[in-house]
Image: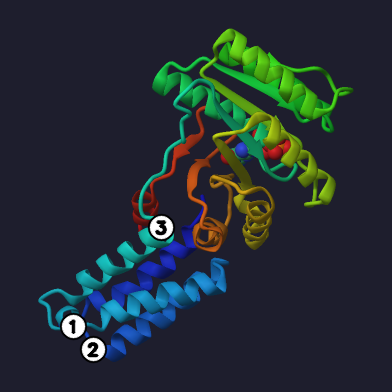
Amino acid sequence: MAFESLTERLQQAMSKLRKKGKVSEADVKEMMREIRLALLEADVNLQVVKEFTKNVRERAVGVEVLESLSPAQQIVKIVDEELTKTLGSEAVGIEKNPKIPTVIMMVGLQGAGKTTFAGKLANHLIKTEKARPLMIAGDVYRPAAIDQLKVLGQQLDVPVFDMGTEVSPVEIVRQGMELAREKKNDYVLIDTAGRLHIDEALMDELKQIKEIAQPNEILLVVDAMTGQDAVNVADSFNQQLGITGVVITKLDGDTRGGAALSIRSVTGAPIKFTGTGEKLTDLEVFHPDRMSSRILG
Ligand code: GDP
């Protein structure tokens, strides 16, 4: 699982303080040095590491903390609070349209897990609010993506609108939206194409789909295993398209976790879900405080 070595390193850094009755400024400094190294080794963005360690240090060297009865515990609490802040403070749910349908567009590079996430999200909406979603197969460049979405649709008993691979995705989305309005679906989930790298043609197409669909959410799906690349990808999608949230997939894999820790700070876009496996149920709503506790172990 993700974060294993980071958790171990952070615990080591903080456990030294636990053995001491009184903690000096030098002790805090030493701990911060170790935390900083642990975060950098976990591939956390340098700017994010700097900001985080600065905030923790400022609070930790406070007189009240150092002179308190259990300074170590207080410092652990500060680290937890600052990590939660780095991860976004509050859980942010799906932005709903006051009128149906709520339109959610999935974007991201090929292989990030968009199609899988579309299925997971449909399942989540059905389970939590008895939703009646329609899924639109807009990834016409990877023919298997359409079949993959249809298979998911069958498993979930969710209709999938597709027009094969010969029609432009913009037209597919336009007609799919019409169908959803006619059938009064409460959610429309649009699966879009990805490429191996960000290119202009991809962005243009996504901008056109955005124009047609007027989505309430543009969720960027990124693969945690790609490390800082995931952060760079998120930054460029955000600048070009304006994303409303991030989904981090493959956190079940052997990732160091730096991407998950950096993405909120770097892009300002909230992490909304994490993917923790290939099954439809392997989806978690993202809660910054829970993730922080998990990382700190
Ligand atoms: P797309 O090209 O973005 O639509 O990506 P897919 O949805 O086809 O996913 C690419 C691969 O990643 C597939 O083999 C999925 O089963 C796998 N995958 C997606 N999400 C997760 C996840 O959270 N954990 C793991 N382990 N695999 C995932």
> Relative to 81, is 204 on the left or the right?
right
Tell me which amino acid carries mark 1: Leu
* Extreme-bottom residue of the structure: 26
Q: Is residue 86 left or right of residue 114?
A: left
Q: CA distance from mark 3 to mark 1?
A: 24 Å
Q: What is the spatial separation of the Cα atoms under label 2 and label 3, in whole angstroms? A: 26 Å
Q: What residue is shown with label 2? A: 24
Q: Position of residue 64 (x, y in %)?
A: 15, 80
Categorize mark 3 by other alpha carbons within 10 Å: few (<14), some (14-19), many (20+): many
- Would you call the spot at circle 2 few (<14 residues within 10 Å), some (14-19), or many (20 or more)? some
Residue 81 in the image, given as x and y percentages of width and height: 31, 63
Residue 157, horizontal then vertical, whole percent: 58, 11
As measured in the structure, the alpha-carbon distance from the residue carrying label 2 to the one carrying label 1 is 7 Å
Q: Which residue is under mark 3?
A: 295
Residue 23 drawn above or below residue 101 = below
- On whether ligand 1 comes within 8 Å of the CB at mark 1, the answer is no
Mark 2 residue's CB less than 8 Å from ligand 1: no
Image quarter for ligand 1: top right
**Residue 239, located in which quarter of the rendered image?**
bottom right
Identify the residue at horizontal 73%, vertical 41% (top origin): 207
Which callout, 2 or 3, points at the residue further toward the start of the chain? 2
Q: What's the residue at 43%, 16% (across, down)? A: 130
Which residue is denoted by mark 1 in the rendering? 66
Residue at 54% across, 34% down = 216
Query: In the structure shown, which secondary structural element does the residue marked by tag 2 occupy?
Result: loop
Name the side, left or right, on which 45 lies relative to 82: right
View extreme (right): residue:
166
User: Of callouts 2 and 1, which one flags the residue occurring earlier in the amino acid sequence?
Assistant: 2
137 left or right of 63 in image: right
| Res 127 → quadrant | top left
**Depicted 256 relative to depicted 286: above or below:** below
Residue closest to the far top: 183
